[in-house]
Image (cartoon, rainbow, N blue to C red):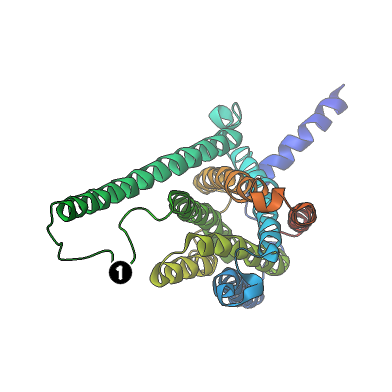
Amino acid sequence: MRLLCLLALIPLAAAECKCDSDEEGHNKSQALKYKLAAIASILVAGTVGVCLPILGKTVPALHPERSIFFIIKAFAAGVILSTGLIHVLPDAFENLTSPCLSERPWGEFPFAGFVAMLGALGTLMVDTVATSYFKKLHADNAGSDKSVGDEERARENRGQVPVHTHATHGHSHGPISTDAESDLLRHRVISQVLELGIVVHSVIIGVSLGASESPKTIKPLVAALSFHQFFEGMGLGGCITQAKFKTRATVVMALFFSLTTPIGICIGLGVTTKYDENSPTALIVEGIFNAASSGILVYMSLVDLLAADFMSPKLQNNGRLLFGTNVALLLGAGCMSLLAKWA
């Protein structure tokens, strides 16, 4: 009986030991080389990934209305979905159920799942409110333009010639296409919220990698994170392209995405001596941000990236393209899931 009790206590003792920093396998100089390689590799991968769809507007084959664009976007959405569920959410559970945290309240409630749910619901609310606000704003502007047009027509009926004659220019101030404006507003909200979700977990990943001094930990992460950053960039770049932002806003969003993880690594490098990944504060902050980020990414990938495209007339009326996008989605999710072994 005593032997059974001792055996039962072994996992608890092992769990308690994990709170101590593991110095085995640490090599600062070698780890620094891998970190510098990671900064360069992730920066290039992210920049190329996010810029491909944006620059693709000038390449007919990569235009947002082409079939290949839908297939690439579905693959990227699969990567983002897998990132949220396979990479980020399990990390959040691991952080918030760590034996280094007190049993109460962290061991008594599934905070990771709860925060992920709040992240998804919060994204839905932001998505809805932002879209509603911009639609009303555009409707008010269109209404004011229409009233100006009505006044000019009334003047014409009274025999007064307006200073600005619309007949000579062949256009009117009324809304050209309400549906087109609505779609544009949706894409703009989607791209901004998606970037927020990606940026949150990218910073956390970067800081964790930068603070690590174990080459064994960093080496496999370089390839995994480069792949991850490239296809996340393609998904975000596709949304930015469809949002039709002005050049300045497009450049800012692309740079912000590309630089986030490398900046996170640099921050990690700066706090290497002070940062303890097993401290309660670090575990709670990382866990909550990871969980919220997971909720955002899952919502955005399923609702705004996949559902919007999969329910569009272009895919619904083209069986071959629908099959291709489903295959691309499964491949993206599958490839990113396989990387969980190394990431």
Q: Position of residue 140 (x, y in %)?
A: 28, 46
Quarter of the figure with residue 227:
bottom right
Asked which secondary structure carries label 1, the reply is loop
Residue at which label 1 appears: 169
Image height of 275 relative to 27, above or below:
above
Nearest the camera: 247 or 37? Answer: 247
Quarter of the image where the C terminus is located: bottom right
Image height of 5 relative to 113, above or below:
above
Quarter of the figure with residue 219:
bottom right
Q: Residues within 10 Å of mark 1 (few under 14, many from 20)?
A: few
Q: Residue at x 66, y 54 (%)?
A: 77
In this view of the protein, can residue 212 be seen by the observer? Answer: no
Amino acid bearing label 1? His
Question: Is 256 displayed left or right of 214 in the figure?
Answer: left
How many discs appear? 1
Question: Is 227 displayed left or right of 39 in the figure?
Answer: right
Nearest the camera: 212 or 306? Answer: 306
Nearest the camera: 300 or 166? Answer: 166
Q: Position of residue 341 (x, y in %)?
A: 78, 56
In this view of the protein, can residue 256 be seen by the observer? Answer: yes
Quarter of the figure with residue 327:
bottom right
Q: Residue at x 52, y 53 (%)?
A: 194
